[in-house]
Image (spheres, rainbow, N blue to C red):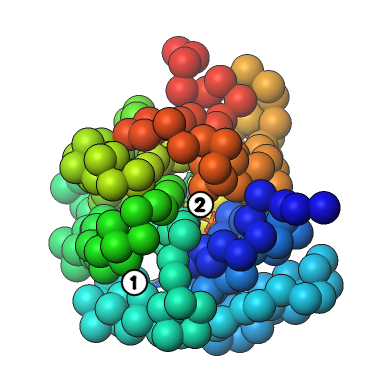
Amino acid sequence: MSQRFDNKTIIITGAGSGLGRAVAVRLASEGAALSLVDVSQAALEETRAEVLAAEPATNTTLIVADVSKEDDVKRYVDQTVASHGRIDGLYNNAGVEGKQNPVADYGTEEFQRVISINLNGVFLGMKYTLPHMVKQGSGAIVNASSVGGIRAVPNQVGYGASKHAVAGMTKDAAIEYGQYGISVNAIAPGAIMTNMVKGSLIQIGGEDGWEDVGREFVSVNPMRRFGEPEEVASLVAYLLSQEAVFINGAVIPIDGGQSQAY
Ligand SMILES: NC(=O)c1ccc[n+]([C@@H]2O[C@H](COP(=O)([O-])OP(=O)(O)OC[C@H]3O[C@@H](n4cnc5c(N)ncnc54)[C@H](O)[C@@H]3O)[C@@H](O)[C@H]2O)c1
């Protein structure tokens, strides 16, 4: 039986953990060849093991690269084209949360670090994959925004700035490249239980208190729970698939309704 991602190559940045890893497993199970990018080789190896456990025949390329560095981004794109011959989709996902502090105490270097990964990394990923997609006359990009790209989140000015900017860049790129049969969308997840969210809760509640902080946090979510990485993977797979070709320039919350609530 044919599957949605047969003969398709998808690049996933930040593929070594959390949402990137869940999307890798999901796309592999639907027939995709994968170019997996992360700063950590060990994390990439773990993701590959999970992918192959789910779908042993998956063609995977692992690329250690830092998305905030232009040469690294150019290299992961070139290496993907050299190995797979094409790029059908990009999940522009690598990101960091940053050390939490109110604006006046927020480190200037920390602000620049968060922006360089979450914002520059997404920009560079689009910049270097789009020419290949234009040549093909098709392609889909999903950028990682956040509820923090729609609403304010306290003590995370670097994160909030970067995720609002990702939503803006997504809309710009969408209206520029729709004419080539390319879609550019963003997802805006709420709190999905991954290493990043655990790290965030530890910053607030400490090693002993983070689970309590987590329970309190989701008590005001309309669905009263964290999201699962697999739920996000389902949305990303849809947006990267042919089924979603006319969805372009959208920033789609996946948050249990949190971004609509007071
Ligand atoms: N988990 C959530 O609740 C949530 C909510 C909203 C948005 N997001 C966004 O989704 C994305 C993934 O989040 P996650 O929860 O899976 O985080 P995670 O920390 O579990 O995984 C992030 C991955 O990105 C990699 N990475 C970090 N910096 C990198 C760099 N410079 N170059 C390449 N790789 C790098 C890390 O090594 C890690 O493997 C992020 O952009 C995050 O902001 C997550």
Residue at point 28%, 47% (across, down):
180
Location of residue 193 in the rendering, given as x and y in whole percent from the top left corner: 65, 48
Residue 220, above or below 201: above
Q: Secondary structure at mark 2?
A: helix
* Residue assigned mark 2: 200
**Within 10 angstroms of label 1, few (less than 14), some, or many (20 or more) residues?**
many
Residue 254 seen anywhere in this rendered image of the structure: yes
Quarter of the image that includes the C terminus: top left
Res 97 → quadrant = bottom left
**Residue at position x 65%, y 42% from top?**
234
Q: Earlier in the sequence, mark 2 or mark 1?
A: 1
Residue 164: x and y, percent?
Answer: 27, 39
Looking at the rendered structure, the kind of residue marked 1 is Val
Disc 2 + disc 1, Cβ < 8 Å: no
Label 1 near ligand 1 (CB < 8 Å): yes
Q: Nearer the viewer, residue 201 or 48?
A: 48
Q: CA distance from mark 2 to mark 1?
A: 22 Å
Q: Which mark is residue 173?
A: none
> As rendered, which of 65 and 192 lies closer to the eye?
65
Disc 2 marks a residue whose amino acid type is: Ser
Left or right: 165 in relation to 89: left
- Secondary structure under tag 1 reads loop
Q: Nearer the viewer, residue 20 or 1?
A: 1
Q: Is residue 53 above or below residue 19?
A: below
Residue 67: give its label.
1
Q: Look at the picture and state if 97 lies above or below 62.
A: above
